Image (cartoon, rainbow, N blue to C red):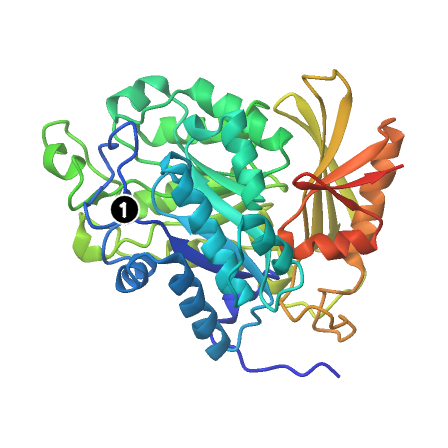
Amino acid sequence: MIETKKVKKPVRTISGVTPLTVVLKPKKCNHGTCIYCPGGDNVPQSYTDKSPAIMRALALEFDPYRQVMNRLEVLEKMGHPTDKIELIIIGGTFLQYDINYQYKFVKDCYDALNGKKAKDLNQAKKWNEISKHRCVAMCIENRPDSCSESEINRMLEFGTTRIEIGVQILDDEIYQKVNRGHTVKDVIESTERLKNAGFKLGYHVMPGIPYSNPEKDIEMFKKIFDDNKFRPDQIKIYPCQIVEGSLLSRIYKEINFKSYTQEQARKIVTEMMKIIPEYCRVMRIMREIPKEKITNAIEKLDLRKDIEREFRDSGVKIKEIRMREIGFNKKEGVSDIKLKILEYEASNGKEFFLQFVDLDNVLYGLLRLRIFKDKETGQDKAIIRELHVYGQAFEIGKKGEEKNFTQHSGLGKILLEKAEEITKEQGIKNLLIISGVGVRQYYERLGYELDGPYMNKHF
């Protein structure tokens, strides 16, 4: 029998891993400041000093080691398992910081997870493979113009598995007017490079951005999924608001800008949710910006809750991943499930989206397999960009035999075997996996070997 503890805020780990956020020290972006960004001197750009994660980081002087130790302690007190950690690095544009700071920051995070200080990053990663607190995934927030090949290689060296880029809107004219500092071409090119490197990719989008309108927002959102040059795996929807300290807070009357009302934001986000395909997950709706920092604030930061409740009450079936996850649906364990495979073109490659679902399309586990042509060799390559079994997280080594647990029940292995089968059918002789440092041993047991930043299996 699996012993369970009472968990405070179980939604934190209901998707199978325990997220742990660390914040970078303040630094301005190289391009300057977008007009809607608060950009304070004492906090990282795009954040305010009243955001929960930033307040914690300020109290700990942005020290990554202390931030990780603090969060581990809090999470354990709340009853959450802390053996499978997704490390999330937020703040400024990390890849634009001093390189030595980048390496030290990441090493300090691993050192805190390991409970001891390594001589270098490689040793810290090696220790983390068997650590009590394993980094099974790492996410870096980034910009489309900071995703060069060398920057991608550095992120791979850190052990990164997921990248989020600020896209906001697909419009070069608006990018110029809001001082975004990159182009739609940058979005397209970075999207392809990141996917080919194996990263799971998220977009941040901003309905209501200055110089847009509701019709344009919806048109842009449809393009993100209709046009195969984009098609992210995840999305965050952040309606634009006038934040204290931003340039927008000083000029919004001059440019005749009005942020969306709560009702307008609700309608637009509702329409966006209906557009999202099965392979994409909505990570967040609304930024955690306190009301006192916002002019004409949308009152409800938990807008998502209302929208999702309306969908469930009305019986409208939404395809996006989070609403379909087993943890967010009243289901008990694994029963009557089938393997469903969705194929789609994206960024000059083919994506195979494998998912275990039941008769109600509730999601139990997924795998993302990408096949594309290597530009150097001209040969087809296959890479798994994500393998994820959903359900409440519980400890490594325990078997998912109880009806309330889907993790550790063998679904991941079956998904992996199917991906190997598809790869062989495509005539490809080996399969790469982007793997968090803390998951390497799992893949080793299944016949994979470490090959640079990837796990690799030859057929």
Asked if 203 appears above or below 319 in the picture, the reply is above
Q: Residues within 10 Å of mark 1 (few under 14, many from 20)?
A: some
Q: Is residue 162 shown left or right of residue 246?
A: right
Asked if 6 appears above or below 105 in the picture, the reply is below
Q: Nearer the viewer, residue 200 or 252?
A: 200
Q: Nearer the viewer, residue 196 or 444?
A: 444
Q: Where the N terminus falls, by quadrant?
A: bottom right
Q: Where the C terminus falls, by quadrant?
A: top right
Determine the residue positioned at 77% across, 71% down.
Answer: 399
Determine the residue positioned at 30% across, 22% down.
Answer: 174
Instruction: For residue 403, say whether it is visible.
Output: yes
Q: Position of residue 384 (x, y in %)?
A: 71, 40
**Local secondary structure at mark 1:** loop
Q: Position of residue 185 (x, y in %)?
A: 46, 18
Q: Nearer the viewer, residue 254 or 431?
A: 431
Asked if 278 appears above or below 423 in the picture, the reply is below
Instruction: For residue 358, say whether it is visible.
Output: no
Q: Nearer the viewer, residue 359 or 291?
A: 291
Instruction: Report which residue position mark 1 lands on.
Output: 26
Name the amino acid, label 1: Pro
